[in-house]
Amino acid sequence: MSDFLGDFLGDFLIVRLAAAGDVLLTTALAHALRRARPQSQIAWLTSRYAAPLLAGNPDVDTVLAAPTPGPGLAAQARALAALASTGSALSLYSWRRRHPQATVLLAHRSLKLRALLRLAGFRRIVAWGREAPFELEQHRLAQLGALLQAAGVAAGGDSGAAADLRPQLHLEAAERADGAAAWGAAPAGAPRWVLAPGGAGNPWARMPNRRWAPERFGTLARRARAEGIVVRWVGGPGDRDVIARSAPDLPAAAIDAATRSSLRERAAVIAAADVVIGNDSLPLIMAQALGRPGLGLYGPTAGAFIHAPGQAFVQGEAGCGPCYDPRRGVRGQAYTCGRARCMEQISAAAVWQLALKVHHG
C-alpha cells in the first residue's frame, strides 16, 4: 500500500456499472470494506438496471445510479458523465464534495472511466494495474481482493483470497414470502430445482455460445419432474425464446412469469430453491449470494475462476478453450466462435448425476 493511500483511508466509492452479475459479485468488496472500516461511508456508482441488486444492502450507504451503459467504452463514459453533472442532487459531483478524501475502488479496467473520475474531482483511485495486478489465472473474487489490498484493506482470513469474499444479496421478508409462494402447492419435502437456461449477455456484449443447449435443459427438467422434483424456470426478458425451447410444454403464462419478473423477484424464487442449475450468468451468482447450492455449466469461460468456491460446476472441454480473454474485448474467440463445441460436450446425463450429488450435499 502506498503511503499516500494509507494517510487518507476514510470513505469509499465503489464503481461497477454492469453487468448485473458482476455488480452482484462486487458486493463482496463492499462487505469486506464494511467489516474492515465500519465507520466509513460507502457509496456505489452503478447502472439503473443493476441498482435494485444493492437495495437493502447494509454495506452500502448511498447508491448513485447512472443510465445503463450501452456497448463500448464510449457508452460507459457517457453514462458516467450523465451522473457527474452538477445538476443532480445525488450526483457524483455532489457526493465527492461531501466526501473530499474518499478512495475510489474502480472495478472496471477502463482508462476512460478512471479519467472521468479524475475530472469529477476524485484524487485517490484504486484500479487494476500496477498497484492491483489483474491476473487472468485468478478467481474473480481474488481479483476484487487485489483492489482491497491495494487500498490497504484486508479481506479477512487470507487477505484477498477468493474464499474470504462472498457476494451479498439482501431480501426483505415479504420478498422471500413471495418467492416461496411462486413455487405453488409443492408437496411437503419435495426438492426444488431452479433452471436458468438463458443469460450469456450484458449491456455491452452477447456471448450466446455460453449457453447449454435448451433441449438438454428440457431433458433435465423432464427427468427431474419424473423423480418428483419441482422445477421452476428463471430468466430475463431476453430469455423468453430460450425458455420456450427448453420447455415447449410450459404454458405461455408461466413463461411470462419467468421472464417478466424483476431482478429481485427472480432472486426470491432462487432463495427458496434447493439447487440452481444454469449457464455462466446472473442466477448462479444470485445463488451464491443467497447461500443456495449452485451447479454451473461452463465452456468458453473458465468455471474454476468464476464459479463460487466450494460449489459444483461442469467445464465443457473441446481442446480449444476456455477461450474467453477479457483483454481482447468483443474481438476475442469466445465472442466469434459460433459452434460452442465445448458446451456440446456437456451431456444431460452428466449434469443429472452431478445435480443429484449437489442436492444431497
Image: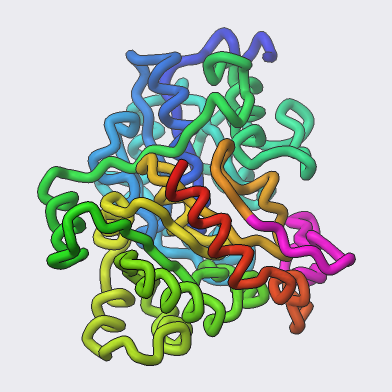
Q: Nearer the viewer, residue 315 or 133?
A: 315
The answer to whether residue 205 is seen in the rendering is no
Q: What x and y, as percent, mark residue 328?
A: 80, 61
The answer to whether residue 312 is seen in the rendering is yes
Q: Is residue 259 above or below residue 139?
A: below
Q: Nearer the viewer, residue 95 or 138?
A: 138
Residue lying at 40% horizontally and 42% vertically, measured from the top left: 289
Question: Is residue 180 on the magenta stretch?
Answer: no
Q: Would residue 8 be found to the left or right of residue 83 on screen?
A: right
Q: What x and y, as percent, mark residue 215?
A: 54, 84
Residue lying at 64% horizontally and 13% vertically, measured from the top left: 4
Image quadrant where residue 99 sits: top left
> How many callouts does the rendering have?
0
What's the magenta region? 314-334
Question: Is residue 321 on the magenta stretch?
Answer: yes
Q: What x and y, as percent, mark residue 303?
A: 67, 51
Q: Nearer the viewer, residue 253 or 10?
A: 253
Looking at the rendered image, the quarter that the N terminus falls into is top right
Residue lying at 50% horizontally and 63% vertically, measured from the top left: 278
Image quadrant where residue 352 sits: bottom right
Q: Would residue 4 be found to the left or right of residue 133 on screen?
A: left
